[in-house]
Amino acid sequence: MISLNDLLVIVPELFLTAAACLVLLFDVFIKDDQRDATHWMAILIMLVTIFTVIHGQPPQTVTAFGGMFVRDHMAEILKVTVLIATILMFVMARPWLKDRKLFMGEFYSLSMFSVLGVMLLVSAGNLITVYLGLELFSLPAFALVALNRDSKLASEAAIKFFVLGALASGLLLFGMSLIYGATGSLDLHTIFASIGTTPHPHLLQLGLVFLVVGIGFEFGAVPFHMWLPDVYEGAPTPIAMYISAVPKLAAVGLAYRLLEVGMGPLAGDWTMMLAIMAALSLVIGNVVAIAQANLKRMLAYSTISHMGFVFLGLANPTPEGYSSALFYAVCFALMETVAFGVILALARKGFECEMIDDLKGLNRRSPWFAGMMAISMFSLAGIPPLWGFAAKVLVLKSAIDGGMLWLAIVAIICSIIGLFYYLRVVKVMYFDAPAEGVEPLAPKSDLAMRWLLSINALGLIAMIGFSGVLFAWCQHAFGA
């Protein structure tokens, strides 16, 4: 039976569910020229949700619904970061959506339902909750990619995303069924305790393989990365921003819940699988990114390489390893939103600013936006003393501490390779002249977007002094 304590534990999720339904209903009764009310209502809802997550966070881990839902500090960090990234998307997307007549309530309600799925996923204590959260996150995301129904590229990207997402979801579900067959339980803690006594160890190991495949797809890690570049390129730019940040945060929570909480005794098996995916992602992501002329595809392959760095932390199954992976995922999400934010600010109807050459001479026309893009590129490249450098050092240290010096060396070499395509963007903005006949880039005049994008970019510099505080918060989440 549902108790009052169960409801109190999931207050943020209950509030967001009710609010998303309210936004959907409210939008039906307003006119198109009143759509700004939906926009600001959605932002207010996300801010209130952040308050309920932080203010209501208990000092210790608590569970609800018989352990199916877990509320702990790791989930708190991921939820807050996901909500912040979604607010950034809402604010930066508004001018873009208005230009293309896509400024509709469905954008906000689908986004909120997708965020709700992430919040359930990172708090899952049971395989059923894991699958429920994953599907609730994924289905609205498929629809968001196809938001621009007049774009063939968006429709193609949505179909690819849906088909491959359904395949990965099916493989993950099959792995869960094998684990249930081997242990007789869906509760992650019970599965953990049953691993040493199960009469079907090979069935359990086979189920583990399918779990790792599902996790690899959510991260966009090689060899399960095929969907990522096409979806980034075809999706509307605000949705590409969302997909670049939010699923990666959700995947960290998914990996920790399934692998550490559920399959911890088999760490010797899954750490090597993660290490191999990390090495492949680092090499292929950085090498293929060099050949990209499309800025969004370049950022997609960059994301693949960065997920290799996250795996460096996860491959060391200790509190320090998980802390570094969580810290890296949070840093990456906020760095990526700056890059996509600048693309959104420079795009206008009929010109999406999706090619690297579109940024030629940007410094001459808008030094401020060129500077923000440069900060994002330098931070993604891990150039000291920016925030991205601290994140890379922590996961490299974690890999070395976990006895994977070879993987750390691969990551360092690939980081040097990655400098090429990040610095190429900076070179194009500062040293190349725009092609003849090209209309000068004119950033949008939306003040809310300018201010928030500027705060986000400058925050990448300001956080240099607060990296220790954030990392200590991540360590506290895992009891380090």
Image (spheres, rainbow, N blue to C red):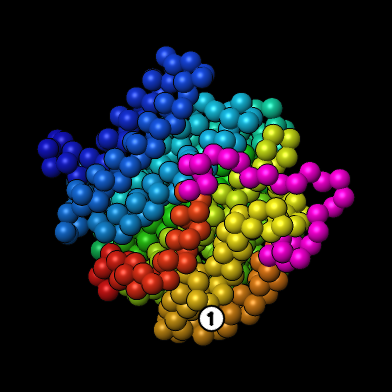
Residue 330 visible in the displayed image: yes
**In this orientation, which residue lies closer to the viewer: 428 or 49?**
428
Residue 242 visible in the displayed image: no
Numbered-mark total: 1
Query: Which element is circle 1 on?
Result: helix
**In this orientation, which residue lies closer to the viewer: 328 or 430?**
430
Please provide the residue range marked out in magenta.
426-451
**In this orientation, which residue lies closer to the viewer: 380 or 62?**
380
Q: Check residue 379 for magenta coloring.
A: no
Above or below, comparing residue 159 to residue 336 in the picture:
above
**In this orientation, which residue lies closer to the viewer: 176 or 9?**
9
Residue at image position (48%, 42%) is 448
Residue at image position (44%, 16%) is 30
Above or below, comparing residue 131 to residue 33 in the picture:
below
Residue 233: image location, x then y, percent: 68, 46
Residue picked out by circle 1: 408
Left or right? Give the position of 55 relative to 123. Answer: left
Residue at image position (51%, 41%) is 447
Give, as a three-letter code, the residue at label 1: Ala
Above or below, comparing residue 435 to residue 149 in the picture:
below
Quarter of the image for the N terminus: give it: top left
